Amino acid sequence: MYKPRLFAPGPTVVPPETLLELARPVTHHRTAEFRDTFKQVTELLQYVFQTKRPVYTMTGSGSLAMEASVANVVAPGEKMLAVVGGKFGERWQKLGLAFGANVITMTIPWGTAVTADQIAAALKKDPDIVAVYVTHSETSTATAIDLKAIAAVVAKTPAVLVSDCITSIGAMEMRMDDWGIDIPVTGSQKALMLPPGLAFLSCSEKAMAKIAKTKAHVFYAKIPAYEKSLADWDTPYTPANTLILALRTSLNMIKAEGLEKVWTETAKRAKAVREGSKAIGLKVFSQSPSDSVTAILAPDGVDGENLYKTLYKSYGLRLAGGQDSLKGKVVRFSHMGYVDAFDTLAQVAGLEMACRDLGAKIEIGAGVAAAQKVLASS
């Protein structure tokens, strides 16, 4: 018998307090009580987004917020820049094509981070670009970009900067207002410690001005409808109200901990896994590692899919394998949300034992010791 432990980069573990909220009887959403709760949740989301702008809540996965940020911003035929360096960067490209945008694709090697200089050069070459789409933390490659530097570049142009922050908001430093990010998007099942089902985005004044001039070919994801309803602390369509009630609990946990402390602790857990892996001879895949998720290359001679499966079947650790070109090459560890130092040690210990089981020459305990040193540091 073993205890299953969820360490995949989404969905992540939901705290018991939040699960208890989900067990409460279903209530009606068109009430004063719900509007009061929704107001509290929206204000807490503003804290997590680090913005004074409204944050819109949609019922759907994070991809719905991504779709909304394309369909409402880029009219058919207009140019958008999509940075593709992983599976979720590809989603920006696909969404643009689906809505008739003239998609300019900037392809970068998986595991590398697009730079502000590259974005600046692309905008200089093609000043007709109306929006730039990037991924703050590319979940498929466990790679982070310097979003602050990129935002500073885009802010000097008429283009709107949109960022997939689905595995960064609530886990990594992301300051919408201070950095000048026009539209950050995220979902409920990552660092916000909730089951899948809610999508969130916020829009700067610059973004809302562009949206006002764009004829959106959508109905459910039309951002102005959410803007109008939020004035009364409501949603335009039926919300996943039970998830919203539970979200208040998870967001209050983040607020009580302090967002900066959450960022620091997440970074420490990520560093512990990286250092623990290096101590047993394994390599980190990304050249610019994210703090919310880490991708570790499987040892020579070990199939990454077998490693991923062994971690779960033998030790109860549910991680994630590689996607597309990385399938069979890496395993991915989440550091987001409701995890602590001892969960992190379990990740490294499980990695050691699973690698050993599959024939890799691993010094059992070396990785755990290295991880402990990181976690014990001030």
Image (cartoon, rainbow, N blue to C red):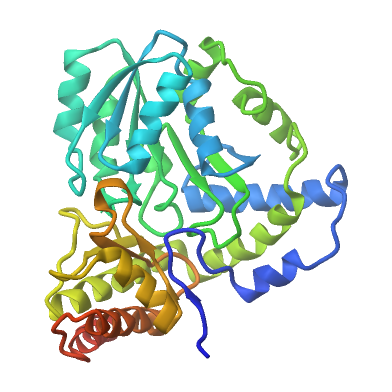
In the rendered image of this protein, does residue 4 appear above or below residue 300? below
Q: How many marks?
A: 0
**Location of residue 96 (image quadrant):** top left
What residue lies at 44% left-to-right and 13% top-to-bottom? 100
**Location of residue 150 (image quadrant):** top left
In the rendered image of this protein, does residue 368 appear above or below residue 236? below
Q: Along the horizontal axis of the image, is 121 left or right of 100?
A: left
Q: Along the horizontal axis of the image, is 114 left or right of 136?
A: left
Q: Residue 259 at x, y = what percent? A: 45, 62
Is residue 162 at least partly visible in the picture? no
Q: Residue 9 at x, y = what percent? A: 42, 60
What residue lies at 73% left-to-right and 31% top-to-bottom? 229
Q: Residue 214 at x, y = what percent? A: 52, 12
Q: Along the horizontal axis of the image, is 160 left or right of 108?
A: right
In the rendered image of this protein, does residue 14 appear above or below residue 341? above
Q: Quadrant of the C terminus?
A: bottom left
Q: Along the horizontal axis of the image, is 95 left or right of 361?
A: right
What residue lies at 22% left-to-right and 28% top-to-bottom? 106
Q: Residue 139 at x, y = what percent? A: 35, 51
Is residue 20 at least partly visible in the picture? yes
What residue lies at 19% left-to-right and 53% top-to-bottom? 288
**Location of residue 250 (image quadrant):** bottom right
In the rendered image of this protein, does residue 143 appear above or below residue 347? above
